[in-house]
Image: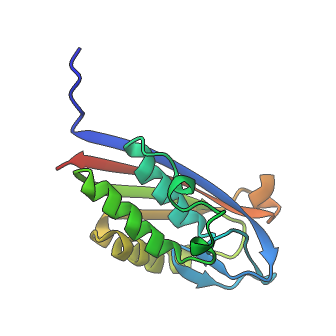
Amino acid sequence: MTNSVPQFRVGNGYDIHRLVSGRPLIVGGVELNHPSNLGLDGHSDADVLVHAVMDALLGALALGDIGKYFPPEDDRWKGADSVVLLANVVEIINSKGWNILNVDSVVIAERPKLKPHIDSMRKNIANGMGVPVEVIGVKATTNELLGPEGREEGISCHAVVLLQKI
């Protein structure tokens, strides 16, 4: 068996945040209007989509998760724009000699309907990552009224990335 580093790496990310009143609802860098005026609770802007992508990127290279780089105990990240944090994670990935080939993600939320905002989310993520929008996949689904997403207690996201050694 050889100890060489593979030329391709896959990363998987997941995030979930509780819906609460008094917070903006930001998903994929887009501020949305929830029918019940709810937003995602978290130390930063709580953008579940961007957080899942960041964890997938870091996980692909076994670099930990976003809490390692942007801990909630650190006031520098309070209310932070997650797309800016994403750009920082991409710098880490690139500095290790890896190129981002693609991202695929799915956001799980009953409301609001995300389909009209998908293109804007893809553009925001692509801009934050410095990659073409064509390599960013964002899908949305409901949870058919099941679980915390279905009961509108929260919104979650799964993301997968593929990296290539430069």
Residue shown at 47% from the left, 64% from the top = 138
Q: Where does the N terminus fall, quadrant-wise? A: top left
Can you tell which quarter of the image residue 114 is in?
A: bottom right
Instruction: Name the foreground residue: 140 vs 85.
Output: 85
Residue shown at 72% from the left, 72% from the top = 111
Q: Is residue 23 above or below residue 94?
A: below
Residue 146 appears in the picture as rendered: no
Q: Is residue 4 above or below residue 81?
A: above
Instruction: Name the foreground residue: 81 vs 114.
Output: 81
Q: Is 164 on the left-hand or right-hand side of 138? A: left
Residue shown at 39% from the left, 44% from the top = 60
Residue 157, position as x, y percentages in the image: 59, 58
Q: Residue furthest top?
A: 1
Residue shown at 42% from the left, 41% from the top = 62
Residue 87, position as x, y percentages in the image: 38, 69
Instruction: Name the foreground residue: 121 vs 115.
Output: 121
Residue 68 appears in the picture as rendered: yes
Residue 116, position as x, y percentages in the image: 54, 80
